[in-house]
Amino acid sequence: MILLDGKMVSEELNLKLKNKVDSFDVKPQLDIILIGNNPASLSYVKGKKKAASLVGITTNLHHLDENISQEEVERLINSLNQDEKVDGILLQLPIPKHLDQEYLMDLIAYEKDPDGFHVVNQGKLFQKRKTIYPATPKGIMTLLDYYNIPIEGKSVVVVGRSNIVGMPISKMLLDRNATVTICHSKTKNIKEITKTADILVVAIGIPKFITKDMVKQDVVLVDVGINRVDEKLVGDADFDEIKDIASYITPVPKGVGPMTIHSLLFNTVLLYESKNTK
Ligand code: NDP
């Protein structure tokens, strides 16, 4: 088994990105909007800020009160959209229920969307046009390519169909000529399907859902899940059970997570460069 070491790969790629950013006179700027004090979000934002600063990207954190009004958040996003200095705007999800998440995500200028979540950027992805790819799927593709894992012609099963992971990674793998099957909560006989996978991507948010009897020998397993169990982070697959069967496997943590952050920074630099070449 070979570990798909997202931590090591992201550190190497972040260093490359730093060398590029070092050559810029004006540094790229990423503004992060964090609403409330969700502990997981606080920790993700801390990680993003730290990685950005190592790469040389300036971050501004707008930490807003849990009870902030929709109008106030809209005002902030509008002002960041207009601000020439701002290259990327990240709305840390989830946001409190009283706010209209879809509306706010659409309000962020799609030219300032380093997460690649904007409906315009996702529309471009689904029409196979040049776009800003969503950070987690892009991180997964970068990791598979780093380890030279063949994709074309492979049987790929994606478990999960969210807008931020399952759907876009399915499309990106399809565009690389994999044969892709998507499973979800209403899929019947899921085990029969996951067992056919040469590459299995799991993004559902259920700890250790994928067990060893659900995968075939030599599977490439990409575990996107991050679940907190007894103060420890575990993935959507049972790593200990599957590691001896898999040819490649991502750990949780230190697998897809750091690759997502790398992609976010990579996308911020892309947005900066496209602004400056206009
Ligand atoms: P969502 O909750 O948006 O989507 C979950 C998906 O899983 C849905 O499509 C759902 O199906 C499916 N699902 C739920 N239960 C089952 C089941 N029993 N069998 C099959 N499919 C099921 O999750 P996200 O995509 O946002 O996140 C998934 C996981 O990945 C979470 O643990 C999250 O924390 C993690 N994550 C990690 C990131 C990283 O950087 N490593 C980044 C983003 C997310 P249905 O559509 O039918 O409801």
Image (spheres, grey):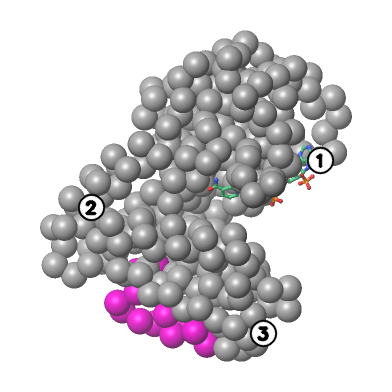
- Name the magenta segment's main secondary structure: helix
Within 10 Å of disc 1 (Cα), the crowding (few <14, some 14-19, many 20+) is few
- Among the two numbered marks 3 and 2 on one chain, the one whose residue lies closer to the N terminus: 2
Among the 4 quarters of the image, the one containing residue 203: top right
On-image quarter of the C terminus: bottom left
Q: Report the front residue among 54 and 142.
A: 54
* Amino acid marked by disc 3: Asn
Ligand 1 contact, mark 1 (Cβ < 8 Å): yes
Residue 152, percent across and down? 49, 21
Q: Which mark is residue 18?
A: 2
Left or right: 237 as drawn, with respect to 273: right
194 relative to 105, above or below: above
Distance from the alpha carbon under mark 3 to that under mark 2: 37 Å
Q: Is residue 161 visible?
A: no
Residue at image location 67% in from the left, 29% down from the top? 238
Give how far across and how far down residue 96 sits, in percent: 68, 73
Chain part drawn in magenta: 74-88
Q: Are marks 3 and 1 in contact (CB under 8 Å)?
A: no
Q: Secondary structure at mark 1?
A: loop
Pick the residue in front: 32 or 66: 66
Badge 2: residue crowd in 10 Å (few <14, some 14–19, many ≥20): some
Question: In the rendered structure, which amino acid carries the disc numbered 1?
Answer: Ser
Sequence-wise first label, 3 or 1: 3
Whole-angstrom CA distance, mark 3 to mark 1, is: 33 Å
Q: What residue is at 67 percent from the left and 37 percent from the top?
A: 236
Which residue does the numbered mark 1 point to in the structure image? 185
Q: Are marks 3 and 2 in contact (CB under 8 Å)?
A: no
Label annotation for residue 67: 3
Disc 3 under 8 Å from ligand 1? The reply is no
Identify which amino acid the numbered label 2 is placed on: Lys
